[in-house]
Amino acid sequence: MGAADSMNKAIDYVNANSKRFVDELFDLLRIPSISAQPAHAPDVRKAAEWVASRCKAAGLSAEIVETKGHPAVFAQGEQVAGRPTLLVYGHYDVQPEGDLKLWNTGPFEPVIDDGKIVCRGAADDKGQAFCAILAAEAWLKTAGSLPINLKFCLEGEEEVGSVNLEALVRAHKDRLACDYIVIHDTAQFDEGAPAVTTATKGLVYKEVIIRGPKKDLHSGSFGGTVANPANVLAQVIASLHDDKCRVTIPGFYDAVVEMSAEEVSMMESLPFTDAGLLSDLGSPRTYGEAGYSTLYRRWARPTLDVNGIYGGYMKEGSSTIIPSLAGAKISMRLVANQKASDVGRQFDEAIRSQVPDTVTCEILDHACCDAYLADVTSPGMQAARKAVGIGFGKEPVLIREGGSLPILPLLKNVLGADSLMLGYCLPSANIHSPNEFFHVRDFEAGIRSSTALIGLMAAD
């Protein structure tokens, strides 16, 4: 049997067993594996055990690997020297339920509503990661073996920052060695617009604290005699952008790489309008760096935003004071080639250059990770695009993600492998919100896509 025939037979198996696969996903979704809440630690372990058992049922070898926190699950098929190796990364832990009153049904009582599987974890990431396990089963049950070396690393701490993932990956570097990493923790562009994500932004998160007098002062008695930290902070923040909405930090844009012509062309063909965005968000006008479209700015231009400001009197009524301190939390989203460490240093230097000697300034570091950009011309990326096209029956678009996935540069640094980001859920799937969902048709298309990827990687 040829490679194409084997792949088609595996996809036929997926289609024939789709109802059973949904039922099995329901079993996993019923486990409230909330990693952020210690009371649910037994449930997190129960989910790990379920995943390991299901991998074995698919025909893979699997084991639970302990960490200093919640356990991970490693699984794999037969490993044959010289074949392409894919490592599927995913997570089986989930976010807390949120406001129960906003759920139409119980957050861990999966139902199908208007074709959607509604439950916490349906899209993020139990349902999407399960697609790859089921794809492995389809090959093993129809062809008797996998045509590539397939591995899984499924963790239980993604929703709490993957605090033990780096140590886990470094400790098992040889065991997890691969040519490409497959990640399903992203989304399509829109309904009817399947996608392959090519990039995520980096992040530098700082807190700037301006201090003046040792205590709050009467603004009438002391106004005009000492610097007001809130006034100084406002001036410093205002200095960070020019009238073209460009960040003024020296060197901020030096390493920025523009999008490829193919990506720009594909981006411009997408069903996106500023009017539609404004209608969804309720904002009166768009805003951002001059010379770039809204979608371009979201995906491929670095930004700087104030996330919160504090200081002085903010309660009901008035209190005429000069506050003793004022602070702001500021995040910068970075793009390919920008180094978070460099931007962090540039930010500190720019802030200190704007702060007068009438106050003192403290800068705290809260988060730092690099951006990630995939090689869209690599054999793995070409196979991923073809696979999604087969699974969804429509050629995918290339998109970028405005958020950050610190695991991508981590895995690239430790394993030396590029990531293929194949998201199967909709961007409107209420991830981290009440009534999270994963459409049944997209779940089925995702399994087909993962099945096709295995075959196409073997062919390449």
Image (spheres, rainbow, N blue to C red):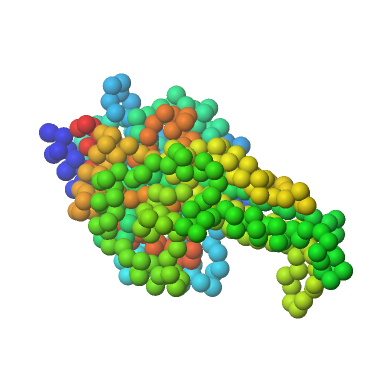
Query: Is there any visible trace of residue 147 in the rendered image?
Result: yes
- Quarter of the image for the N terminus: give it: top left
User: Residue 29: x, y in percent?
Assistant: 44, 56
User: Residue 170: x, y in percent?
Assistant: 52, 28
Instruction: Compare residues 41 and 428 and report the one nearer the observer.
Output: 428
User: Residue 458: x, y in percent?
Assistant: 23, 32
Q: Is residue 260 left or right of residue 157?
A: left
In the displayed structure, would residue 331 be above or below residue 155?
below
Residue drawn at x 60%, y 58% is 238
Residue drawn at x 50%, y 37% is 339
Instruction: Compare residues 404 and 323 and report the one nearer the observer.
Output: 323
Residue drawn at x 47%, y 29% is 414
Query: Is there any visible trace of residue 33 in the rendered image?
Result: no
Residue lying farthest to the right in this orientation: 221
- Residue 318 falls in which quadrant of the image? bottom right
Residue lying farthest to the front in this orientation: 224
Query: How many numbered markers are drawn?
Result: 0
In the displayed structure, would residue 263 be above or below residue 165?
below
Residue drawn at x 31%, y 63% is 272
Residue lying farthest to the top in this orientation: 81
- Quarter of the image for the C terminus: give it: top left
In the displayed structure, would residue 460 be above or below residue 123?
above
- Residue 99 falls in which quadrant of the image? bottom right
Instruction: Compare residues 252 and 327 and report the one nearer the observer.
Output: 252
In the displayed structure, would residue 175 be above or below residue 271?
above
